[in-house]
Image (spheres, rainbow, N blue to C red):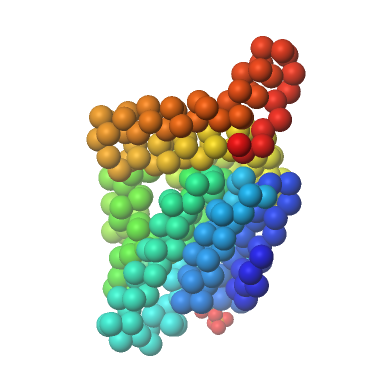
Amino acid sequence: MAEYQDLEVTVADYIATITMNRPQAMNALNSNVIAELEAAVTELGANNDVRVIVITGAGKAFVAGADIKQMNSLELQDFRTFIANGQKAMYAIDLCEKPVIAAINGFALGGGCELALACDFRVASEKAKFGFPEVNLGLFPGFGGTQRAPRFIGRGYASEMTFTGEMIDAAEALRVGLVNHVYPADELMDSVMKIAKTIASKAPIAVARSKTAIKMAGDTTLEAGLAFERESMSMVFPTKDRAEGMDAFINKRKAEFKGE
Ligand code: CO8
């Protein structure tokens, strides 16, 4: 595994954990963190010992947004590169064939909220806070937030969050469907690991294809999505894991999936 300076990356029992690890700056996304995040997601996506990826943050933030101090020093041309690289890192999560879960331990603001939205689903601590404070800085969400937030929480709520820049708490995030579950802070990681473990025990190719098919639901027509679903299912049918899963059911035993 590659060495990372601002991320802590571990793999155990088919579950990879990426911890955003710049707590002194609230895990803000500077150029290095953005490059490392893209590299880590891509590396773990290609690692056969990984079936699920969890992203969380060290300290009291998940990620408090793009690095304001770095952005403030950029000329327009470099700013454009910074946005493009940020979007590319978030999109690496879409491209990754493995489920990516955001375990939101604290502040998920601006680019941090956008990172959470790029994940397949989100689980939060009671201490988590969400928001798009970019309008306070004369910006607006630029790492995919204007596109992903309306898809997941609806245009009206996404618009209010973006235009006001106000934070919402974990209970409100749960109410509007931004997160799937909220747990006490000290139970967050165990609860997320339980979900990750369940996913890791399922047929990996089927899970991977379902991720891509589900992602298409927000990005294409129903007709194209159904065609993709049919084709993907036909790809999954000849796998050894499909034969194993059905045989295990018929013979009343637990299936052992190998990702083949
Ligand atoms: N960037 C850089 N440094 C940060 C950031 C950030 N986003 N957030 C916090 N820090 C730093 C602080 O400056 C401080 O550093 P120092 O100790 O050197 O003064 C340290 O982290 C601790 O922060 P605070 O003292 O402020 O801690 P508090 O507990 O008082 O407050 C908050 C925590 C509420 C998270 C507060 O730090 C805050 O409001 N942070 C900024 C949140 C924000 O505005 N985020 C949006 C950034 S813009 C963005 O994400 C745009 C993304 C897409 C646009 C793409 C354009 C290229």
| Residue drawn at x 30%, y 56% as measured from the top left | 146
Labels in figure, total: 0
Instruction: Please tell me whether residue 217 is drawn above or below residue 118 in the rendered image.
Output: above
Give residue 15's position: percent from left, percent from top: 67, 49
Q: Residue at position x 44%, y 82% from top?
A: 69
- Corner quadrant of residue 155: top left
On the image, the x and y values in percent for residue 49 come to 67, 50
Nearer to us in this view, 254 or 240: 240
Could you tell me if residue 44 is visible in this image? yes
Tell me where residue 110 sits by quadrant.
bottom left
In the image, residue 100 sits, relative to residue 59, either above or below, namely: above
Residue at (65, 56) in percent of width and height:
17
The answer to which quarter of the image holds residue 9 is bottom right
Q: How far from the left and from the top, in percent, is residue 260?
A: 61, 36
Q: Is residue 3 above or below residue 19?
A: below
Left or right: 41 in relation to 70: right
Residue shown at 51%/40% (left/top)? 208
Is residue 133 visible in the rendered image? The answer is no
Q: Is residue 45 left or right of residue 228?
A: right
Q: Is residue 260 left or right of residue 221?
A: right
Locate the N terminus and report the quarter of the image it occupies: bottom right
